[in-house]
Amino acid sequence: MLSMLCPDLYVPSICQVDLSRLVARGINGMVLDIDNTFVDWGSSDIPAPVLAFFDEAKARGLRLCMLSNNFRGRVEAISGILGIPAARGLKPMRPAFRAALALLGTSPRETAVIGDQIFTDVLGGNLAGMYTILVIPTSRREFVTTRIVRKLERAVLGCLMRRGMLALQGRAGTAGQGEACRR
């Protein structure tokens, strides 16, 4: 069970995902969580380095879509800014990830999921057979239930690291991803 909670890659920031390595792995599509993955919770302000990351991903031919259980209006607004489609669904349930795959037109094996939560993004992506990437949350501000689940996530991350199943790649700032993507 612990392996289903383990991401394939753990990086401080979406901006530190090596797109050339993903492409070399045969990844053709990316499913992206929104809140605290590339924008702060509740915000629609996308930092310039994140916009550059999306532009580079598109330039490399990667198909992109967002997957969120957030309010439709906010998801559509961010989708419009980025010029990528969005699926809404209850993560970690498989139908949500299948909807994202249908939007991308990719198979699970050639698709990466990037998110900040183990019990939604990583678990759902692993259950769907995708390559999973966990990032440090962009902000400590979160929905109340997410704050509660974070305590369990920290315990799982610690266990994964102690067992040698997971290591943070790259360098994390003290505030998490935020600084790495805002420069």
Image (cartoon, rainbow, N blue to C red):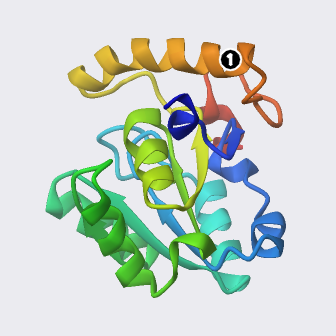
Crowd tier of the residue under label 1, counting other residues whose Cα lies within 10 Å: few below 14, some 14–19, many 20 or above = few
76 lies left or right of 16: left
Res. 78 image quadrant = bottom left
Q: Is residue 158 left or right of residue 78?
A: right
Q: Is residue 180 above or below residue 145?
A: below
The one nearer the camera, 115 or 53, is 115
Residue type highlighted by circle 1: Thr
Residue at 47%, 54% (x, y): give it.
125
Residue 163, quarter of the rendered image: top right
Q: Is residue 100 above or below residue 73?
A: below
Q: Residue at x 83, y 36 (%)?
A: 170
Tell me residue 52's x, y (percent).
67, 66
Name the residue: 34% across, 44% down: 43
Q: How many marks?
A: 1
Q: Residue at x 49, y 44 (%)?
A: 122
Q: Which is more toward the observer, 158 or 56?
A: 158
**Quadrant location of the C terminus?**
top right
Q: Position of residue 138 (x, y in %)?
A: 52, 34
Q: Circle 1 sits on which residue?
A: 174
Q: Position of residue 85 (x, y in %)?
A: 36, 78
Q: Is 133 left, or right, of 43 in this rendering?
A: right
Q: Secondary structure at mark 1?
A: loop
Residue 167 x %, y %: 77, 29
User: Is residue 69 depicted above or below 31 in this figure?
Assistant: above
Residue 173: quarter of image:
top right
- In front of the other: 7 or 134: 7
